[in-house]
Image (cartoon, helix red, strand yellow):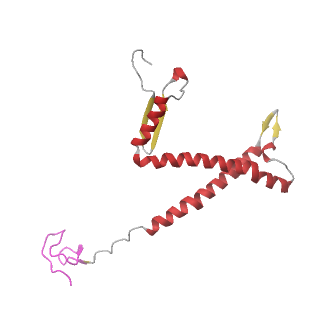
Amino acid sequence: MTEGVDEPELIVEIVAPLVILKINRPAARNAMTKAVAEGIAEALDTLDSRSDLAVAVIIGAAFTAIITAFTADILTPIIAAIGGQPDFSKLTFTIHKSQFKYGAFINAVISFAILAAVVYFFVVLPINSLMARFKPMPDEPTPVHDCPHCRSSIPQAATVCAFCTRDVVAAA
């Protein structure tokens, strides 16, 4: 940092399609202040079309936490009870005093699979069907015939060929 130059506490960068908010307070370990919070709120307000994206990210993060807790605390204990292992997260193996926690990895894979299924079936499919319902119908192609002079395809209603510029009789 250059002395005597006031640098902003909040840096907003827009790198399509991302908006990056950086807190620039290294001396205070980037602690949140009222001014920084107001700056974040102001930055989100200026991004009218992207504010719904910010809400989606926050809700998605909360939903991910719920799915992870569901997997670790409810689903894997049920699966483990059937298999005889009381808790997947405790499954490990050791090689040369290095411990590998493959049970936690199994929990993460199950969480990801559930999250992917929920997003696909409850977000992607409904949005795709809604978009298909409101998709504009393609226009009917304009009927064409060949120009008798240059053999280019021209609309049937044309009286002058767009390619050779000669007069033609409009086809009926």
Main SS class of the magenta portion in the image: loop
- Taking the spot 42% from the left edge, 37% from the top edge, the residue there is 42
Residue 157 lies, with reference to residue 89, above or below; the image says: below
- Taking the spot 52% from the left edge, 23% from the top edge, the residue there is 26
Query: Would residue 33 be counted in the magenta stretch?
Result: no
Q: Along the line of sight, which residue is nearer the eye, 108 or 94?
A: 108
| Name of the residue lying farthest toward the right | 84
Residue 46 location (% of width, % of height): 39, 41
Q: Quadrant of the C terminus?
A: bottom left
Q: Over which residues does the magenta segment extend?
A: 145-172
Residue 28 lies, with reference to residue 142, above or below; the image says: above
Q: Quadrant of the N terminus?
A: top left
Residue 65 location (% of width, % of height): 65, 46
Q: Along the line of sight, which residue is nearer the eye, 34 or 84?
A: 34
Q: Quadrant of residue 168?
A: bottom left
- Taking the spot 44% from the left edge, 47% from the top edge, the residue there is 50
Count how many numbered circles sit on residues in the image.
0
- Please indicate whether residue 94 sits to the left or right of residue 32 in the image: right
Residue 48 location (% of width, % of height): 40, 46
| Name of the residue lying farthest toward the top | 3
- Please indicate whether residue 115 sits to the left or right of residue 96 in the image: left
| Name of the residue lying farthest toward the front | 34
- Taking the spot 45% from the left edge, 38% from the top edge, the residue there is 41
| Name of the residue lying farthest toward the bottom | 172
Residue 75 location (% of width, % of height): 75, 54
Residue 15 lies, with reference to residue 10, above or below; the image says: below
Query: Would residue 154 be counted in the magenta stretch?
Result: yes
Q: Along the line of sight, which residue is nearer the eye, 53 or 146?
A: 53
